Amino acid sequence: MSNAPAAAHALDVLEHLSRHAEPVPAASIARDLGLPRSSVYHLLKVLHARGYVTHYVEERRFGLGQAAYELGSAYQRQAPLARVARAAMRRLVDQCGRNAHFATLDGRDVIYLLEERAAGQPMLVTDVGVRLPAHLTASGLAMLSALPASQVRALYPDRASFVQRHGTGPRGLPELRSMLAQVRSAGHALEVGTVTPDLSSVAVPVIDRSGRPLAAIAVTLRTDDATTEHVAELVTRVRSTATEIGRRLSPAAARA
């Protein structure tokens, strides 16, 4: 960072703006970031000229600009999560001989971005692009367990939020909270027959540098094979893969 302080401070400003739901005054940006006001005004002027910041003149506040949105859209088009995860996921499948999938959270759903299949393993419902209720899947529970309690509460405001499948899964927020506490304590999520009868999955979240879940990695096995020893071995391999992918997606996390 010492080699390019201006670039680092510009990114600090953009990240600060991204964390606020409303535009903020330059003075509060300077205060919160511990930067001189003159430096912050200069950075905002440059970012505004490039379209990354919008200046609300009458309100004397600043927010993210169109260029920031376009940059985020380009990120999505390149599908970086799947690109970065693919090689590590293939190694995971080779090591454990089980189907593995890589998913991200979208509201109350998980979206499957990658599925790597092992020879001789059962077909799953987790093809790329498939959505499933997060609270019913190991991947979803792993990611939900890494969210703040307030965000989980906002995602599940009432009992109608809890879709059922095969008559299984949590039916309300207290039950979900209890399950998430168990996931945090164990360090992984375990789903037994909730999505597909007779199949179980273990999952670990991929965490970014701020501690938020970027995605989750899960391995699926027949429930008859889900012995304590076997699950523990799979969790170790999945956790190692999640750590590897997390370091590649969020390098600062590896240096922290």
Image (cartoon, grey):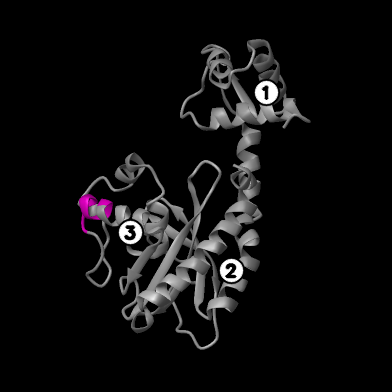
Quadrant in the picture for the C terminus: top right
Picture residue at 59% right of the left edge, 78% below the top: 94
Q: Nearer the viewer, mark 1 or mark 3?
A: 3
Pick the residue in front: 159 or 226. 226
* Residue for badge 1: 48
Distance, label 1 to label 3, CA atoms, is 41 Å
Report if residue 66 lies within the magenta region: no
The answer to which of marks 2 and 3 sits earlier in the sequence is 2
The location of residue 72, given as percent across then percent down, is 61, 43
Q: In the rendered image of this protein, does residue 187 appear above or below residue 64?
A: below
Q: Disc 3 marks which amino acid?
A: His
Apparent side of residue 68 relative to residue 199 in the rendered image (left or right): right
- The answer to which image quadrant residue 92 occupies is bottom right
Q: Nearer the viewer, mark 1 or mark 2?
A: 2
Q: Give the prevailing secondary structure in the magenta stretch.
A: helix
Q: Disc 2 marks which amino acid?
A: Met
Q: In the rendered image of this protein, does residue 90 appear above or below residue 152?
A: below
* Residue for badge 2: 89
Q: Is residue 51 visible?
A: no
Q: Nearer the viewer, mark 2 or mark 3?
A: 2
Q: Is residue 26 visible?
A: yes
Residue most toward the right? Answer: 3
Q: Disc 1 marks which amino acid?
A: His
Picture residue at 26% right of the left edge, 45% below the top: 157
Distance, label 2 to label 3, CA atoms, is 23 Å
Q: Which residues are magenta?
A: 171-177
Residue most toward the front? Answer: 229
Crowding around mark 1 (Cα neighbors within 10 Å: few <14, some 14 to 19, many 20+) is some
Quadrant in the picture for the N terminus: top right
